[in-house]
Image (tube, helix red, strand yellow):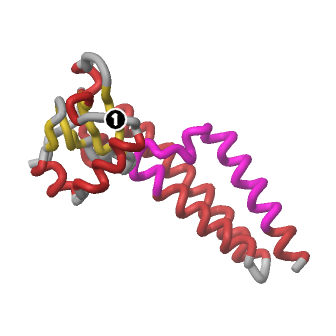
Amino acid sequence: MLRGLILTALAMTWVVVLVRINGLRSFSKMTNFDFVMTVAVGSLLAGASQSTSWLPFLQTLSAMAALFLVQYASARLRKASDRFEALVQNEPVVLMRDGQVIDQALAATRVTRSDLVAKLREANVLDFSQVRAVVLETTGDISVLHGGPLSDALLQGTKAAR
């Protein structure tokens, strides 16, 4: 029991050190890669806390460091290369525009109309005509833009589902 507590504390400290080196973005939900990173680090942390000897524990810590290194390299490549960005990153998809549901986009993204309506309620939309756009973001979140006029810049980089 004591070993588990000590190893967990050491592994958590290691994660904090890695986040301090790599930056706050380490566990953001900006990209698919970030989501996978969060899940993988959690799994490795659990493995580290259950290690039965030092070698597997150190292997787990080095795997964590490798994940942070790969995430850092990926972020740098995404920033430097539009081609790499397009390869690893999904585009946000417009599900609704100017009060009209885009059924093809719902079908292509496997978002149900009831899920869409639930998000509209969550955003305090009182009438479809208030909705300027609903976007399925690259993180899987759904953004609801409603109210006054919509700046085209807010939809830059989105796509209508094919």
Q: Is residue 18 magenta?
A: yes
Q: Is residue 70 left or right of residue 137?
A: right
Q: Is residue 136 left or right of residue 29?
A: left
Which image quadrant is residue 107 in?
bottom left
At 67% from the left edge and 48% from the top edge, which residue is drawn?
Answer: 18
* x and y percentages locating residue 138 in the rendered image: 34, 45
At 27% from the left edge and 38% from the top edge, which residue is drawn?
Answer: 134
Which image quadrant is residue 66 in?
bottom right
The answer to which of 102 and 23 lies nearer the viewer is 102
Q: Which residues are magenta?
A: 8-35
Callout 1: SS = loop
At 44% from the left edge and 40% from the top edge, which residue is drawn?
Answer: 75
Which residue is denoted by mark 1 in the rendering?
125
Mark 1: which amino acid? Val
Q: Is residue 28 magenta?
A: yes
Q: Is the stretch drawn in magenta largely helix, strand or loop?
A: helix
At 39% from the left edge and 46% from the top edge, which residue is drawn?
Answer: 141
